[in-house]
């Protein structure tokens, strides 16, 4: 057996109480806390970002394509459905889903209350799961084959304002010339916590808007495109723009809701700063621990050098013990961090105020790449720092170290 490993193991197995044994426990704890806190922080951060993004994606695709128009109202000029995408094999490889839509402003009116809303018309091709994940009551719209569906989905804010429940009937008056109105039924109620959506949007049948606008089945207000890889959104958007007709306009969701995505990007930056601070504390504790171990074993170092041990052999003794501290810290950190994430993911033990945080519990996302990177960065950083306090070993002279006893 390697002499350095043997001595390092005997030092760890020494049952005699010493100051360094307490410091070692503190070092293991500090590394464990650093790993656990970073795993939890990144899991919550990614969960929060995904939750917010998914809420946005339920109202707007990654890319929206409309008729080019200077009109800033909610009335769109109609476009043919997927006119330039069909048959384009290059684009089809990067697009996961396409759905048609149209919007129309109007007033929802009950006997006592009235409120302005924006009806977003969708059809059977819509990715209903994106809307269903926000439902708090009722069901999704049931589309009819021969005529338009009279069912709508309203927000919890609108339902409280108009005192509506699932299956209630409400009149909607559409802003056009001449004005029109329809009797509609509440099929479901959604809630996102994002007031700019909850106070404005309701969902209905695209056929209803076609009928009100006198459009044929071949025209829609626009269409929404979902890409397979959101990180390649700009690249895909440029390809779509190159293939579009000259009278079409394109808008990415990151531009449409620029403030929200800038805010999410700022959260990323804060997380990295937080990571640096946590690692600094863990590294500082590690340096202190190794220095204390070296100082406490000064006499042993002197004896080993007097017996012919080289500086590298002595240094390896403390390196092996340092590695042992890091491994133990990483193990307990992962156990605590992942354990907390599992409990929160399945049991939602930490609730949130949806009015302030846009969700009713702390979200968790299992991003194994991020978890692996956290472990690697912490392990490599603390390991590199481990060499710093060991520079004093060559300066320890055997005769002085033995006298130090």
Image: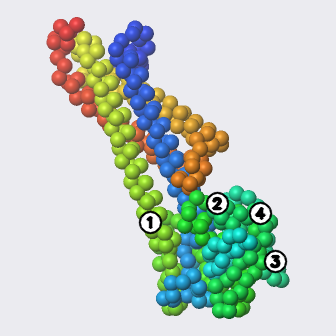
Residue at figure coordinates x 40%, y 57% from the top left: 266
Q: Is residue 173 above or below residue 17?
A: below
When asked about the image quadrant of residue 142, the answer is: bottom right
When asked about the image quadrant of residue 204, the answer is: bottom right
Report the Cα–Cα distance between label 3 and label 4. Answer: 19 Å
Q: Mark 2, mark 4: which one is toward the viewer?
A: 4
Residue at figure coordinates x 41%, y 30% from the top left: 30
Report the Cα–Cα distance between label 1 and label 4. Answer: 33 Å
Report which residue position mark 3 lands on. Answer: 144
Labels 3 and 4: the sequence-earlier one: 3
Report which residue position mark 1 lands on. Answer: 259
Q: Secondary structure at mark 1?
A: helix
User: Quick one: label 3, few (<14), some, or many (20+) residues within 10 Å?
Assistant: few
Report which residue position mark 2 lands on. Answer: 191
- Taking depth in this image into account, of 374 and 347 the one nearest to the observer is 347
Residue at figure coordinates x 64%, y 72% from the top left: 115
Q: Mark 2, mark 3: which one is toward the viewer?
A: 2
- Taking depth in this image into account, of 388 and 277 the one nearest to the observer is 277
Q: Secondary structure at mark 4?
A: loop
Labels 2 and 4: the sequence-earlier one: 4
- Specify the quadrant that holds the C terminus: top left
Q: In the image, residue 290 lies at what x, y percent?
A: 31, 25
Given contact means CB atoms under 8 Å apart, are the residues at marks 3 and 1 in contact? no
User: Quick one: label 1, few (<14), some, or many (20+) residues within 10 Å?
Assistant: few
Labels 2 and 3: the sequence-earlier one: 3
Given contact means CB atoms under 8 Å apart, are the residues at marks 2 and 3 in contact? no
User: Quick one: label 2, few (<14), some, or many (20+) residues within 10 Å?
Assistant: many
Q: Is residue 101 above or below residue 367?
A: below
């Amino acid at each position: 057996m390697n002499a350095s490993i043997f001595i390092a193991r005997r030092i760890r197995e020494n049952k005699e109480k010493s100051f360094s044994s307490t410091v070692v426990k503190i070092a293991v704890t500090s590394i464990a806390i650093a790993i656990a806190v970073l795993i939890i922080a990144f899991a919550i951060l990614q969960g929060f970002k995904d939750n917010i993004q998914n809420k946005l994606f339920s109202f707007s695709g990654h890319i929206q394509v409309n008729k080019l128009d200077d009109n800033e109202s909610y009335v769109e000029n109609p476009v043919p459905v997927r006119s330039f995408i069909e048959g384009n094999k290059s684009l089809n490889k990067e697009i996961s889903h396409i759905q048609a839509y149209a919007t129309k402003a109007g007033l929802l009116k009950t006997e006592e209350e009235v409120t302005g809303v924006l009806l977003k018309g969708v059809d059977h091709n819509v990715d209903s799961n994106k809307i269903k994940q926000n439902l708090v009551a009722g069901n999704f719209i049931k589309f009819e084959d021969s005529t338009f569906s009279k069912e709508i989905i309203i927000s919890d804010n609108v339902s409280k304002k108009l005192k509506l429940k699932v299956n209630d009937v409400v009149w909607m008056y559409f802003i056009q010339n001449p004005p029109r109105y329809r009797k509609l039924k509440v099929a479901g109620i959604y809630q996102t916590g994002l007031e700019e959506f909850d106070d404005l949007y309701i969902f209905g049948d695209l056929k209803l808007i076609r009928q009100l606008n006198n459009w044929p089945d071949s025209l829609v207000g626009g269409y929404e495109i979902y890409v397979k890889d959101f990180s390649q959104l700009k690249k895909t958007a440029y390809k779509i723009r190159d293939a579009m007709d000259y009278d079409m306009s394109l808008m990415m969701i990151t531009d449409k809701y620029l403030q929200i995505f800038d805010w999410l990007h700022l959260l990323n930056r804060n997380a990295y700063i937080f990571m640096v601070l946590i690692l600094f504390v863990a590294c500082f504790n590690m340096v202190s621990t190794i220095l204390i171990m070296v100082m406490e074993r000064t006499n042993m170092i002197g004896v080993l050098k007097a017996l012919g041990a080289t500086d590298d052999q002595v240094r390896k003794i403390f390196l092996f013990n340092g590695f042992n501290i890091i491994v133990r810290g990483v193990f307990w950190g992962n156990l605590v961090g992942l354990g907390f994430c599992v409990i929160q993911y399945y049991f939602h033990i930490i609730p949130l105020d949806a009015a302030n945080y846009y969700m009713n519990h702390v979200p968790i996302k299992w991003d194994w790449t991020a978890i692996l990177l956290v472990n690697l960065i912490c392990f490599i950083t603390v390991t590199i720092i481990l060499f710093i306090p060991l520079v004093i070993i060559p300066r320890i002279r055997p005769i002085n170290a033995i006298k130090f006893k």
